[in-house]
Image (spheres, rainbow, N blue to C red):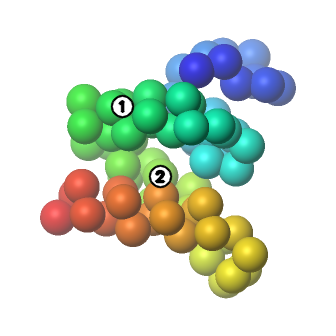
Amino acid sequence: MKHRHLKTQQLSLPALDDIIGRGDLSEWIELRDAIHANRSVAQNILKICKPHLTDETQQRYHLWKYYAERQLA
């Protein structure tokens, strides 16, 4: 996953926000795989999504919040 404005290409919190907010399907598939490989990615997704949940137009963040919660259950 190549992140547009980030200096490092690791799944940091800004990288996750970039993938969720601006990513395409191929990046989302890689993110899904990263969640399955590392539980902490799902926990970080919840952190990223939380501030966006009050905005109903940010459906991507709602989707990833529910997906991360389900993977952590």
Q: In which quarter of the image is residue 23?
A: top right
In the rendered view, tell whether residue 5 sits above or below residue 15.
above
In the rendered view, tell whether residue 35 sits above or below residue 3.
below
In the rendered view, tell whether residue 1 sits above or below residue 17.
above
The kind of residue on which mark 1 rests is: Ala
Mark 2 or mark 1, which has the lower sequence index? 1
Residue 46 screen position, x and y as percent: 45, 60
Q: Residues within 10 Å of mark 1 (few under 14, many from 20)?
A: some
Q: What element carries label 1?
A: helix
Q: Which of 26 and 1 is in front in this view?
A: 26
Q: Can residue 51 be seen in this view?
A: no
Residue at the image position 25 percent from the left and 30 percent from the top: 37
Residue 58 screen position, x and y as percent: 70, 69
Which quadrant does the C terminus fall into? bottom left
With 33 as the anchor, is 61 left or right in this view?
A: right
Q: Which mark identifies residue 45?
A: 2
With 4 as the anchor, is 54 left or right in this view?
A: left
The kind of residue on which mark 2 rests is: Ile
Residue 43 screen position, x and y as percent: 37, 52
Residue at the image position 66 percent from the left and 18 percent from the top: 2
With 4 as the anchor, is 17 left or right in this view?
A: left
How far apart are labels 2 and 1 at the CA level? Answer: 11 Å
Q: What element carries label 2?
A: helix
Residue at the image position 58 percent from the left and 63 percent from the top: 61
According to the picture, the residue beneath numbered tag 1 turns out to be: 34
Q: Which of 64 and 16 is in front in this view?
A: 64
